[in-house]
Image: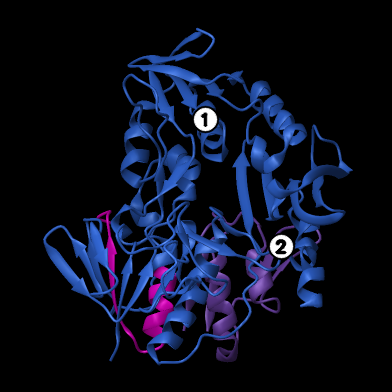
Amino acid sequence: MPHAVVVGAGLGGLRAAESLRGQGIDVTVIGDEVYLPYNRPPLSKEALKGGVDVDGLYFRRKFDDIDWRLGAAATGCSLAERVVTVDDSAYTFDGLVIASGIRPRHLPVPGIQPPVLRTVHDARALRDRLTPGTSLLVVGAGFIGCEVAATARQLGCEVTVTAYDSEPMLRPLGPELGAAMKAHHEAHGVTFHLGQGVKEFHADGVTLADGTRLTADVVIEAVGSVPNVEWLHGNDLDLVDGVLTDNLMRVVQPAKGDGSAGTTAGPTDVPVVAVGDVARFPNPRFDDVPRRIEHWNLPTETGKRAGQTLGALLKGEEPTGDFRPMPAFWSDQYDFSLQSYGEPALGTPTLVDGEWSGDCIVEYLRDGDVIGVVGVNRTKDLMHYRKEIGQEAVDSA
Amino acid sequence: MKIYVDMDQCQHYGQCTFEAPTVFQLNDDGKLEYVGEVDAALAEQVEAAADVCPMQAITVEA
């Protein structure tokens, strides 16, 4: 029976492992955390507010005969020798799933690096310090930063948010909706210092580029993520931003630049797929540009697809099919429930219903086509977009 | 098979309705309604619905 190794025990790794196990393939999963796969979004919201109990966050698991090797990250890999190393241990494989995900980015500035929020461990440490009256400085105004700000306000903390961007959640939402969300946060007592980078970290805060000194009891950094690809170095893969794959999540080797034989890009000789946040793949629903997408629903979509692809390769078959997943995200801040389908960051925002300052629907247009949508408290009205966005490209294919 | 949704956790995102539309629906108020017991023929749909729930609020019993 063929044996697959999955590197990464997050949601994408779980879904790929289950898909492969369901096809009768033996599966070993290597994860850096000691925990079985658990759901991360509550760590900045419900779980942070109510107390961080990992037992309530575990994903249900459909197989009890998957081999979980938890508590240490993969440190190396040789595709040619079909082996993954974890410190001194070696795991050989017939097929490999790259599901190593992302880790929080740190700003490259001097001073004492603040903690981040990625794991149960991080969330517990933060929760312990968010007592009523504590002041919190959030560096970064993306979804996690804004969710932590909202949760901390609900826990009775004084909250300041600082970020380089001019509005919170600027890239996914655009300036108008970002400004509206900023106003909602301000109405709930959050103070913003936006449009300035951090020059230096201190134990009790930051100095901004313009010299402004912000102080707080607790500082947290939430400035995006970087893909975990270092363990793959030395295999001639395209690791510029995550791992490059084709549309069916099969890892692609770039063309060799030295003019030797095999100068065109193509799949690796060894069966390898990538899933989730670490995978950079083209989605013909939008165009042929490979992108990494860090939305919650993609690890499940790409994990299942990659499982099919690797399963076919391990049977000596060519993977077939058509993969056009619809990215989707959700974010709850106070009484505002944001929901999105498609790729709003690729389009120009246009208000189509409601008011920017309240419940609304915003379409994001590219070349006259709706390429993404965001709704505020409009979940049901948004649902038809999930079928419609990019449908033209699907129909004409 | 039996289905249970923890309504304290459910945020009515409606993702389950795309995977198993005969089992899960949002009503006119945008709130989730679902069928508690369904034929095993729908197992694959129901499993997929449970997988895509952002709150992981859906429990399925064979």
Cα distance in 3D space between marks 1 and 2: 28 Å
Q: Position of residue B40 (x, y in %)?
A: 55, 90
Q: Is residue A135 above or below residue B10?
A: above
**Hey, what amino acid is under mark 1?**
Gly
Instruction: Return the residue at label 1.
Output: A140
Could you tell me which residue is drawn at 65 percent across and 77 percent down? B20
- Chain to which mark 2 belongs: A
Drawn colour of chain B?
purple
**Residue A28 is covered by the magenta coloring:** yes
Q: Residue furthest left?
A: A88
Residue B19, quarter of the rendered image: bottom right
Could you tell me which residue is drawn at 53 percent across and 77 percent down? B47
Q: Position of residue A35 (x, y in %)?
A: 29, 57
Residues in magenta?
A: A14-35
Q: Image check: A278 left or right of A322?
A: left
Q: Image check: A188 left or right of A231?
A: right
- Chain to which mark 1 belongs: A
Between label 1 and label 2, give the one nearer the viewer.
2
Query: How is the structure coloured here?
Result: by chain
**How dense is the environment of label 2, judged by Cα within 10 Å: few (below 14), some, or many (20 and up)?**
many
Question: Can you see residue B53?
Answer: no
Instruction: Return the residue at label 2.
Output: A286
